[in-house]
Amino acid sequence: MKIRLGEIAHTRSGDKGDTCNIGVIVFDERHYPALVREVTAERVKGHFGEMVKGEVERFELPNLGALNFLLHQALGGGGTVSLRTDAQGKTFGAGLLSLEIELPEPAHE
């Protein structure tokens, strides 16, 4: 079944220069395999489209039930030079929560 990522996870995002950092953490560890399968670097880059000029890197943190993404060249040069409203990337995490993912149907007893 299709759901929004925000139904199984929360995010935290910020900046390092022109790179946006997004942490995605599942509420329940049983959803971590779906997070790993569905939320790839390619899908994150595609989700943000032209906003991300560089590559997207993904790091897996299974002990935390989390993924961490680095979106390079995503902040218009960074906080001190960018004319973007969100030059520190604080809203990127919230934006990612609208990504639609496939979650297996729950087993019926």
Image (spheres, rainbow, N blue to C red):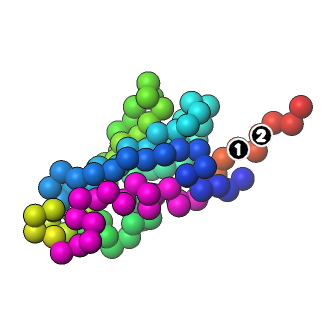
Position of 23 with respect to 109 (left or right) is left
Give residue 106's mark: 2
Q: Residue 70, position in %: x, y?
A: 29, 50
Residue 83 figure quarter: bottom left
Q: Residue 108, position in %: x, y?
A: 86, 36
Q: Is mark 2 on a helix, strand or loop?
A: loop
Does residue 94 belong to the magenta stretch?
yes
Give residue 104's mark: 1
Question: What span is in magenta?
Answer: 83-101
Circles 2, 1 touching at the beta carbon (< 8 Å): yes
Can residue 54 be seen here? The reply is no
Q: Residue 3, position in %: x, y?
A: 65, 55
Q: Image point 55% across, 52% down: which residue?
A: 6
Q: Image point 10% across, 68% down: which residue?
A: 81
Does residue 77 belong to the magenta stretch?
no
| Dominant secondary structure, magenta | loop
Residue 95 figure quarter: bottom left
At label 1, counting other C-alpha atoms closer than 10 Å, the crowd grade (few under 14, some 14-19, many 20 or more) is few
